[in-house]
Each structure stands twice: as structure tokens, then as C-alpha cells.
Image (tube, rainbow, N blue to C red):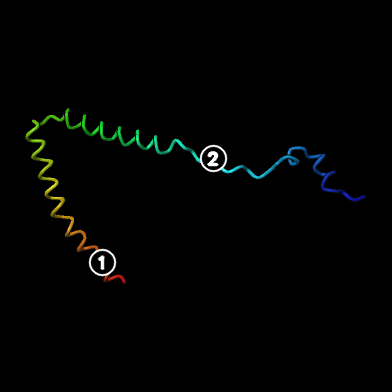
Amino acid sequence: MTITKEDLLSNLPWLANKAAPAPAPVSNDLLPALAIFGAGLIVGAGLGLLLAPKAGSELRNDIADRANDLSQHLPNLRHNDDNSVSTTA
């Protein structure tokens, strides 16, 4: 007696209709979700600045000082990265 594929599948119905899982659908909601998240970040940062315990002029000076420090450190970081790449290559 020979067992055919149809015989086997008829006795195991859960295998008969088993197909490869369908790929997950691409969501069209990603861009709006990211936009809402970005807007929330901006609003949160603005509220944090508004509710800060410092006066506005002190806060603006602190922000300007940090921006100046960052602009002075960026060329140094880039120079250090260039050196590390040349020594490892």
C-alpha cells in the first residue's frame, strides 16, 4: 500500500492549508507618526524652556554659551576622527 500526499494531508487537515506566512504589510502611517513624534519633541523642549527655573536672559546666555562651546569642539572632534582613521587604515 502506497501512501500519497493527498492521503497524508487528508488525515492531517492542519497541514493541508498551511501556506507560507504573508509578508507584513507596509504601513502608510509611519511618516505621520514620525511627524507627530517630532512635533511632540519640539513642544516638549519648548515647554521645558518655558518652565525652567532661570530667567529668560540667563537661559538664552546659557544656550548661546553651549552653542559656542559646541562650535569650538566640533573642529577638534573632526580632526581627532581624521587622525584615528589615518592611523587605523
How far from the left and from the top, in percent, is residue 64?
A: 11, 43
User: Is 42 situated above or below 4?
Assistant: above
- Residue drawn at 13 percent across, 45 percent down: 66
Q: Which mark is residue 84?
A: 1
Residue closest to the far right: 1
Could you say which disc has been placed on residue 48 in the image?
A: none
**Please, is residue 89 above or below residue 42 in the view?**
below
Q: CA distance from mark 2 to mark 1?
A: 43 Å
Nearer the viewer's eye, disc 2 or disc 1?
2
> Image quadrant of residue 6?
top right
Compared across the picture, whether 7 is left or right of 86 comes to right
Q: Residues within 10 Å of mark 1 (few under 14, many from 20)?
A: few
Query: What is the quadrant of the C terminus in the image?
Result: bottom left
Give residue 73's position: percent from left, percent from top: 15, 55
Residue bearing the label numbered 2: 25
Circles 2 and 1, Cβ within 8 Å, touching? The answer is no
- Identified at 27% across, 70% down, the residue is 86
Q: Secondary structure at mark 1?
A: helix
Q: Residue at x 85, y 48 (%)?
A: 4
Nearest to the observer: residue 29 or residue 56: 29
Could you tell whether 60 is left or right of 13 in the image? Answer: left
Q: Earlier in the sequence, mark 2 or mark 1?
A: 2
User: Residue 15 location in percent, x, y?
Assistant: 74, 41
Front residue of 12/42: it is 42
Residue furthest to the top: 51
Q: Identify residue type, mark 2.
A: Pro
Q: Position of residue 3 (x, y in %)?
A: 87, 48
Q: Residues within 10 Å of mark 2 (few under 14, many from 20)?
A: few
Q: Is residue 7 left or right of residue 58?
A: right
Q: Is residue 67 left or right of residue 28?
A: left
